[in-house]
Image (spheres, coloured by chain):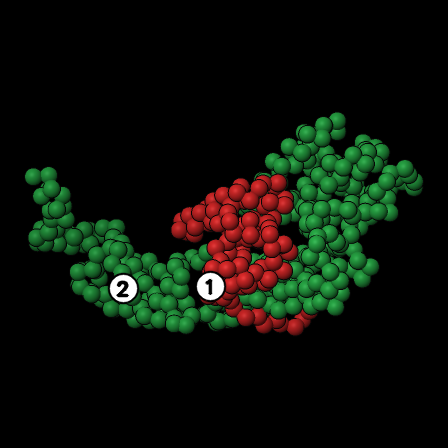
Amino acid sequence: MEYKDYYSIMGVERDATQDEIKRAYRKLARKYHPDVSSEPEAEAKFKDVGEAYEVLRDPEKRAAYDELGRNWQAGQDFHPPPGWDAGFEFTGAPGGRPRGGPGEYGYSDFFEELFGRAQAAGSGPRRSANLQGEDHHARVQIELEDSFHGATRTITLRVPELTPDGHVQARTRNLKVRIPRGVRPGQQIRLAGQGGPGLGSAPSGDLYLEVEFRPHKRYRLDGADLYLDLPIAPWEAVLGATVRVPTPGGTVDLTIPPGSQTGKRLRLKGRGLPTKPAGDLYVELKIVVPQAGTAEAKEAWETLSRQADFNPRARLEEDNA
Amino acid sequence: MNTDRTLEGDVLTDDVRFSIDDVCRGCRLEIEELEVLVEEGIAEPRGARRAEWRFSLRSVRRVRTAVRLQRDLGVNAAGAALAVELLERIAELERRQR
């Protein structure tokens, strides 16, 4: 088991006052709260900070922790010396915490070795012997293509679970989940009975998975509609053309009308996400110009510039006149 | 617990509605606590009377976030409501930026 340096996790000195510890906790909790933070590993850091605060805010636990001495290094292999906790009241009577709190996220082995396992929170007037389990929520990231074809994703959850003797223990669960075709970002998949365990004979809660799409290199998404930037050559824009366009459902031929400008939007009906009804795919034209390159190419452009009766800035000059 | 079984779920769309009991049970809330969150505008149920309240999926998500923020960060309901709205605004801006 690894030793945890709660003072360094909280970024406070060993002689910090309770007020300093509380301030440090509030600040770190705001920084790493899983609902707020975009930092990687935010949840793990939040859990560490919550556990450190759980110990340092409680004078009894803090004194017992300090008793271990200051010579331990974070991560060092640790076993509590025999009798280290003599005289501290929490021994044998863990829990008594308010409902929820950091314990909901689970404690480390180090914490549990020292202070015992947290009891399942049992307070609250609505609690009875038979209480349906809490609903759990998690996110699942999928590719855009998964919505077109359907997919199976394995998701890993760290969830607190109730052991038969009434303790809470953080466990890792791997779930294989069918991602149905036509699912959209922000939609939720409900897995009945996969949430928190019920108390007594009550059924488990449900697990809600919120679907997120990873950013796609080609398509942007708005609701069920997709947007694709399609580069075209100047002559294709002027003369019109039929070009091959990739769509998630396969390549299609698209007719570009003569005289198309950059930003013109062409709609491929029903080529968006396969929802009911299906979304559309909007192709946005973007004229790209080649380098003049060879002398012949340059000559051809010069001929064009002499022969074309075209002033792209006519509107600007009118406005200034 | 690992399982090789592939789980099939149902997809919930924005028109699913949850009753007050669903929300209180799912979020481990007392009815009075949920009422405070409704007063703050975190959740806007349809239905005139409490017994008729029906919550959207989005409302339930906002309630869950607000409950966690209150519990973990020590903010009150009004502060949690503000944070939830700012978080949604950030998410929307990030989505548009992509």
Q: Could you tell whether A170 is left or right of A37 in the image?
A: right
Q: Is residue A279 above or below residue A301?
A: below
Tell which of A245 and B36 is nearer to you.
B36
| Amino acid beneath label 2 | Leu
Q: Which mark is residue A91?
A: none
Residue identified by numbered label 1: B14
Q: Residues within 10 Å of mark 1 (few under 14, many from 20)?
A: few
Quarter of the image where the C terminus of chain A is located: top left
| Residue A118 on image: x %, y % | 77, 50
| Residue A124 on image: x %, y % | 70, 52
Tell which of A70 and A301 is nearer to you.
A70
Measure how far apart labels 2 and 1 are at the Cα level. Answer: 29 Å
Q: Could you tell whether A103 is left or right of A71 in the image?
A: left
Chain A: colour as depicted: green
Q: Chain of mark 2?
A: A
Q: Residues within 10 Å of mark 2 (few under 14, many from 20)?
A: some
Which secondary structure, mark 1?
loop
Q: Is residue A57 above or below residue A180?
A: above
| Residue A122 on image: x %, y % | 75, 54
Q: Which chain is red?
A: B
Give residue A252's quadrant in the image: bottom left
Residue drawn at x 82%, y 33% as measured from the top left:
A63
| Amino acid beneath label 1 | Asp
Residue identified by numbered label 2: A266
Residue drawn at x 47%, y 47% as measured from the top left:
B85
Q: Could you tell whether A76 is left or right of A314 in the image?
A: right
| Residue A256 on image: x %, y % | 23, 65
Q: Is residue A24 visible?
A: yes
Residue drawn at x 78%, y 60% as measured from the top left:
A163
Number of numbered labels in the structure image: 2
Which secondary structure, mark 2?
strand
Callouts 2 and 1 close, C-beta under 8 Å: no
